Image (cartoon, grey):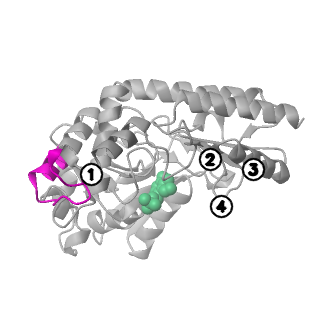
Amino acid sequence: TDKRIFNFNAGPAALPLPVLEEIRSSFLNFNQSGMSITEISHRSSYFDDVINDAVDRTKRLLKLDNRFHVLFLQGGASFQFAMIPMNFLSENDTADYINTGTWSTKAIKEAQIQKKKYCVVASSEDKDFSYIPNNIKFSGNAKYVHMTSNNTIKGTQFQQFPDTNTVPIICDMSSDICSRPLDMDKFGLIYAGAQKNLGPSGTCMVIIRKDMLDAANTDLPTMLKYSTYAYKNSMYNTPPCFGIYTINLVLKWIEQEMGGLEKMEQYNIKKAGLLYDFIDTSSIYKTTVEKSSRSLMNVTFRLPSNELEKKFIAQATEKGFGGLKGHKSVGGCRASIYNAATMESITALIEFMESFEKENT
Ligand code: PMP
């Protein structure tokens, strides 16, 4: 472990070290089965225990009552962009979409491709997605309101979820799932690609409310229907076993080591606060988003010139800080500090940024 870097990747991203260590120590002989978790049948009681444990932990952590199903799908969050309008919109239905960046835009595009009716009720595109819209007026007759809770690329995050007046929110929580407690009454469906806050890529968690499931379109190919997954405990076909196993370990870590989602949120506020406070007092680093819209998960910032940014990234890499380059579509710098980012990694980063500033002003 002494060669591990401070990992600020946006996704796949750093996982908790105790989880990686447990994977390593159990890898050749999972639970005295004489097999690796990657070799075990998904139809075995060994795997039943894993998936049931993962579902139960998700329910406990997010305080889900028995209205909700927890599912594990493949195809990433991007697959959900298409499955959502396909499952929930019939010919005369319409959906509301909030556009807060690249991923919301992609979700909207999939509704458009399917020629579904939708309305973009709010967008922050006018200011390059640097803020979260508020006072949103919804159309009222929508089947759902789609939104992205945390915008991984721009570094903005909804601090509160909008009041949609009983219209269910469908939320892409890929980059902030399980980083804070949620009021589940607002949500009809939540989805998240695992590779930021939950585990490895290749698995997408979907939390779906029963009434959404009951109202979904039925004339769809088997693998494109949520009901297929819900009625077979995500095992209609071979599920992403290793991903689900790792997610279960990460959830166990949140529950047992970090003390649950309230404590996780406090820790995330502390970590991001430290970094933003430093940036706010610095003369060369500037955040790129409105203060009230700042993400606790992805801290985006710029330096005065492209040359200095290049130098900053190069020196950071040399000193063992990885993943600080901003998304290629926006440039600049970004520190992704999901649940697994430690306070130690944040203070080390700030120390480096401080010394870089001294040397370059
Ligand atoms: N939504 C958000 C908020 C994301 O950050 C990402 C990935 N960076 C996606 C969707 C797409 O996820 P996937 O690659 O799993 O399809």
User: Callout 2: 10 Å neighbours few (<14), some, many (20+)?
Assistant: some
Name the residue beneath numbered marker 2. 322
Give the label on residue 251, or none.
Answer: none
Name the residue beneath numbered marker 1. 28
**Which is more N-terminal, label 1 or label 2?**
1
Name the residue beneath numbered marker 3. 314
Q: Position of residue 200 (x, y in %)?
A: 39, 53
Q: Identity of the amino acid at label 3?
A: Ala
Q: Position of residue 83 (x, y in %)?
A: 32, 66
Name the residue beneath numbered marker 4. 329
| CB contact under 8 Å: marks 1 and 3 | no
Helix, strand or loop for disc 4 = loop
Q: Where is residue 347 in the image (x, y as percent from the top left)?
A: 63, 27
**Which is more N-terminal, label 3 or label 1?**
1
Q: Identity of the amino acid at label 1?
A: Leu
User: Magenta residues, as a range?
Assistant: 32-52
- Residue at (48% x, 68% y) in the render: 109
**Which is more N-terminal, label 2 or label 4?**
2
Q: Is residue 206 visible?
A: no
Magenta span includes 41: yes
Q: Identity of the amino acid at label 4?
A: Ser
Helix, strand or loop for disc 1 = loop
Q: Is 288 situated left or right of 209 in this image?
A: right
| 155 or 98: nearer the viewer | 155
